Image: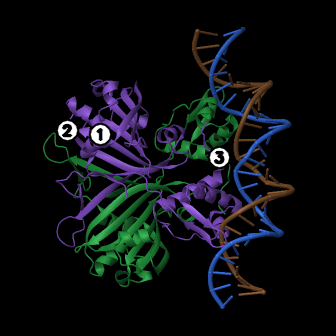
Chain colours: A purple, B green, C blue, D brown
Amino acid sequence: MDAAVEPLKARRIYLLLRERIGSGALAVGDKLPGEPSLAAEFGVSRMTLRRALDRLVQEDLLRRRAGVGTFVHHRELPHRLRADLADVIENLREMGRQTGVRLLSFAYVTPPDAIAAALALPAGARTQRSERVRFLEDGAAFSHLTAHVPEHIGATYSEAELATTPLLGLLERSGVVADRANQTMSATLAGPDVAEALDVEIGSPLLALTRVVHDLDGRAVEHLHALYRPDRFHFQLELLRAGRVGARRWRPMASPDQTEPAALSQTRP
Amino acid sequence: MDAAVEPLKARRIYLLLRERIGSGALAVGDKLPGEPSLAAEFGVSRMTLRRALDRLVQEDLLRRRAGVGTFVHHRELPHRLRADLADVIENLREMGRQTGVRLLSFAYVTPPDAIAAALALPAGARTQRSERVRFLEDGAAFSHLTAHVPEHIGATYSEAELATTPLLGLLERSGVVADRANQTMSATLAGPDVAEALDVEIGSPLLALTRVVHDLDGRAVEHLHALYRPDRFHFQLELLRAGRVGARRWRPMASPDQTEPAALSQTRP
DNA sequence: TCGCCCTGTCTCATAAGCTAGACAAGTTCC
DNA sequence: GGAACTTGTCTAGCTTATGAGACAGGGCGA
């Protein structure tokens, strides 16, 4: 089903080590512990550990020197979007500019209970459900979005419009005033469908965001479940101490700079 | 090395499905697709899929009825902490009250390059490095914290103090005024060490938070790398539209209610 | 009652991931 | 030169997860 190979233990170690390199926990030039000790750390035989290293060497992230050791050779620095958590709307605008969207599905459904409850819908009510994938200019997918919108609101836009316009923009156009939003952040593993959409392997870690948007009257207008590839996207939040020195509260700063809309910036070091 | 069993494909499916149930994507009472189609979706044989279901049935999350289908029977609702992202300090205070800490390590080290850079330390400078695990009252670990503090600041507190007092509290005591913080959220997989500390399996998804705290003079005083079990902890952020109707910015709301310090609340439905 | 779709259960075989070891060979330092 | 590391390579085998199929039987609706 998936084209990738399947030595699972080795793959897990591969993913783990690649992550350590990418995150800088293992810096370029660092010498890895010896294969025997690494194997012990992961609880596998040296051969399987070796398979994981082989792959990293193949990708030029590691270099091995017989008799000396294994070293981090290259740090993969992928295009990475950084979005400011505190600035949803501006994000969207920038997103629309800097990223592309592909609409995967568009349908009217009766939502799962959890979503119906979050949207405070009456029993049996239907929603407009859409699945989209966002990707960078170079076509690299970085997020998978599943949105549910109450049916009567969803009716105000078409499938074709959703394929090109940010959802919050469509809602705004149809008179909905987004007033309040509740976001939750967590982490998950990629299932088969999402894994394919985001071009990762099943079992890869994903950053999960759930957002419920309410209008001025407190009615829920959108339920969004977003999954992000952590290697291509992460959220940032700048916090400022609120009030006097010694105050206990911190206040989130919307964005590093108000004048320059750097809410969404691309790091390509 | 890890006590758990190892049918890896089946286990992955088990984890995935359990996640879907826990998150409510599969609600209680829902009927699962038939075993053949599920097997196809995950790209495995029906037997291996079955092994995953067996385990879920064993845990009473699923019920099977011969001739009818498999249904979600019980939704595991674990103790879960919800912390408000926008209120770091208050979080800490509440954390100290509602959770326990275990100090895993305490040492002075020369930090990895990535951390030295984030702290803007001169080359070769050392840091006070600590690893801690936070757990709920019932002893369930939910986060793994790795902190780096510049050596001269770290010298103002002892190992014993860190084992009982929140780090930011210690910094405050030693005259450091935390003024600004930069947080980044992402997702990772649990490595062997963290997996053991958090009592999860290697390869489980974790929510990752990196925080760099600066003092009034803009000097970095703390680098924190926190890993959270998503099933026991998640971050929440309440956003309010800033300014007039139609404004593009949203402003994070520190906490649902200023008067009641509900920044950290425990959901045990 | 028949047909269809579902779970329940078994078989056996294949495959292949993984282990455990031994040994060669490169490098560094004393 | 030798000790103590390291990576490189192979082997042989075993454990066991996994696959594919067949068949039974329950439930439900046409």
Nearer the observer, A219 or A204: A204
The quarter holding residue A116 reads top left
Determine whether label 2 and label 3 are within 8 Å by CB. no
**Mark 2 is on which residue type?**
Leu
Where, quadrant-wise, is the N terminus of chain B in this rendering? bottom right
Q: Name the element at disc 3.
A: loop
Q: Earlier in the sequence, mark 3 or mark 1?
A: 3
| Left or right: residue D6 compared with residue A25 | right
Which chain is mark 3 on?
A
> Dot 3, how many residues are within 10 Å of its Cα: few (below 14), some (14-19), or many (20+)?
few
Nearer the observer, C11 or A168: A168
Q: Is residue C6 above or below residue A82?
A: above
The quarter holding residue B180 reads bottom left
Q: Earlier in the sequence, mark 2 or mark 3?
A: 3
The quarter holding residue C10 reads top right
Q: Earlier in the sequence, mark 1 or mark 2?
A: 1
Q: Name the element at disc 1.
A: helix
> Dot 1, how many residues are within 10 Å of its Cα: few (below 14), some (14-19), or many (20+)?
some
Which disc number belongs to residue A216? Answer: 2
Which disc number belongs to residue A96? Answer: 1
Task: Find residue A235 and report its horizontal and vertical position in percent.
Answer: 35, 53
Q: Is residue B152 above or below residue B117?
A: below
Disc 3 with disc 1 on a shared chain: yes
Q: Is residue B209 above or below residue B73?
A: below
Task: Find residue A119 and report its horizontal and vertical position in percent.
Answer: 33, 36
Which disc number belongs to residue A6? Answer: 3
Determine whether label 1 and label 2 are within 8 Å by CB. no
**Mark 3 is on which residue type?**
Glu
Residue under the image location 17 percent in, 48 percent down: B242
Which disc number belongs to residue A80? Answer: none
Outermost residue toward the left in this view: B244
Q: Nearer the viewer, mark 1 or mark 2?
A: 1
